[in-house]
């Protein structure tokens, strides 16, 4: 059916760069290839409420279910670039 399949993206993160707080309609998974990223998890609200933060290092993975309830943000708080791989 139309829309079936996977999307893969490699993201380069500059020091201090963050994604916006967001959710994904499909499931998603990511892995840190180089550097260190911090993943923040939020509860829905106005504004979203921070509930946890996890440091991800090379080889670490994370995944989330489909649905807009899984709200998160990724950030590179280190002084070095980072690289992550994402699958949707």
Image (tube, rainbow, N blue to C red):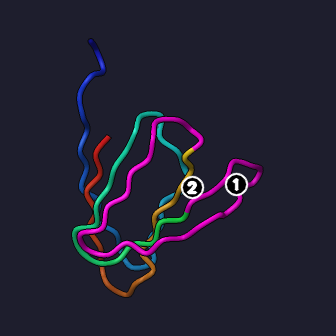
| Residue located at (47% from left, 34% from top) | 25
Q: How many marks?
A: 2
Q: Name the residue under label 2.
A: 21
Relative placement, left or right, of 11 versus 75 is: left
Q: Where 86 falls versus 53 (above or below)?
A: above
Q: Where 20 falls versus 18 (above or below)?
A: above
| Residue located at (34% from left, 69% from top) | 13
Relative placement, left or right, of 45 versus 67 is: right
- Magenta span main SS: strand
Q: Which mark is residue 48?
A: 1
Taking the magenta stretch, the answer to whether it contains residue 61 is: yes
Q: Which residue lies furthest to the right in this view?
A: 46
Taking the magenta stretch, the answer to whether it contains residue 54 is: yes
Q: Where 46 falls versus 14 (above or below)?
A: above
Q: Which residue lies furthest to the bottom in this view?
A: 79
| Residue located at (74% from left, 54% from top) | 47
**For this rendering, which residue is in front, 51 or 8?**
51
**For this rendering, which residue is in front, 26 or 12?**
26
Q: What stretch is highlighted in magenta?
A: 41-69
């Amino acid at each position: 059916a139309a829309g079936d399949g996977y999307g893969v993206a490699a993201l380069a993160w500059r020091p201090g760069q963050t994604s916006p707080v967001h959710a994904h309609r499909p499931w998603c998974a990511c892995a840190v290839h180089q550097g260190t990223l911090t993943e923040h998890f939020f509860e829905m609200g106005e504004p979203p409420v921070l509930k946890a933060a996890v440091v991800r290092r090379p080889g670490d993975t994370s995944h989330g279910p489909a649905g807009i309830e899984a709200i998160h943000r990724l950030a590179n708080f280190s002084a070095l670039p980072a690289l992550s791989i994402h699958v949707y």
